[in-house]
Image (cartoon, helix red, strand yellow):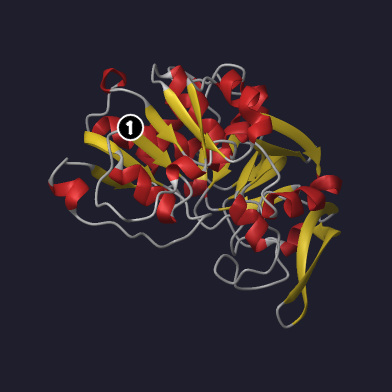
Amino acid sequence: MPSFTYKALRVHEISENQVERSITSCTLDDLPPGEVLVRVHYSSLNYKDALSATGNRGVTRHYPHTPGIDAAGVVEESSDARYQRGDEVIVTSYDLGMNTPGGFGQYIRVPADWVVPRPQGLSLYESMILGTAGFTAALALHKMEQNGQHPDQGPVLVTGATGGVGSSAVALLAKAGYQPIASTGKQDLHAYLEALGATEIISREAVDEPLRKPMLSSRWAGAIDSVGGSTLGTAIRACAPNGNVATCGLVGSPNLSVTVFPFIIRGVNLLGVESAECPMPLRLQIWQKLATTWRIDHLSQIAHLCSLDHLNGYIDLMLQGKTRGRIVVDLR
């Protein structure tokens, strides 16, 4: 394809420990080798993207860089027979947006093994309302159900409920027949959580009890936690016998302080959820469920659409904890 310019949000290192973000003109020569070139229609903003956009070396090692761990668009070129020009595809996870230029640019070039055909039942836009956050929430529920979780056992706690993973988890649990208990510190968003399907809303403090007792009274049959730290510890200690607690985030803290008692007395199961390197057969299965039996009703309630030109402001708001649901970026 002839070289031309396209727009991308680029993060430049201007001095040690200081970066600057700007909308920059790029060419296809700025992209790495790969079998599939995709014209990105939509991306979405994740916490990992916000970290990459501020120069966090734990996410992105080399700058200048284009963040965006999610992308959905149309194949422009492919040297792999599985994909043809015009195919609508999703690319999330792996190294996209970390050290490989990501979805905050109008084009990406990636290995064919990273690409997922858009499942029937989801548009490109809807797939990015879900993105990594929705996929992670679905993977968490899948692992819980593989380990015996069932709606009849009782309600399931969702921490960080107004965030990307949390909002998706509340809506997904409701769709799958569960009773979601939503934990949040944002009192002004209770109506939002109720609209997603939360049957009970509790404060952030109610899931942040100091480790004075090794176990607490059972309050939920399972949990999907994206906060970590003492919140995850409380979710474990207050989980009912044989319940499953899925952990998939550390926005509060990466540390966990609990005793073994919930595990050896109540049989509580702690399930780690890692979506970046999820095997492709399981990845395809989860996306198919999200497009069919687990298709969230009223997906648009979770989303706010923004342009690439306005993305900078939303990155700052996310780092301040002032966003809700999913920020979808329109790159068309």
Do we see residue 312 in this rendering?
yes
Farthest-out residue, left: 265
Residue at point 30% right, 34% down? 144
Residue extending furthest toward the bottom: 16
Q: How many marks?
A: 1
Question: Could you tell whether 329 is left or right of 144 in the image?
Answer: right
Q: Locate residue 70 relative to residue 8 in the image: left or right.
A: left
Whether residue 88 is visible: no
Mark 1 crowdedness (10 Å alpha carbons): few <14, some 14-19, many ≥20: some
Quadrant where the C terminus is found in the figure: top right
Across and down, in percent, residue 66 comes to 71, 59
Q: Tell me: residue 56, above or below residue 234.
A: below
Q: Quadrant of residue 173?
A: top left
Mark 1 secondary-structure assignment: loop
| Residue 143 versus residue 15 in the image, above or below | above
Q: x, y percentage for residue 102?
A: 65, 54
Q: Percent x, y for residue 233?
A: 35, 51
The residue that disc 1 covers is 219
Taking the spot 67% from the left edge, 56% from the top edge, the residue there is: 50
- In the image, what residue type sits under mark 1? Arg
Closest to the observer: 235 or 4?
A: 235
Q: Position of residue 217 (x, y in %)?
A: 27, 37
Up-down relation of residue 230 to residue 282 (above or below)? below
Residue located at (40% from left, 62% from top): 255
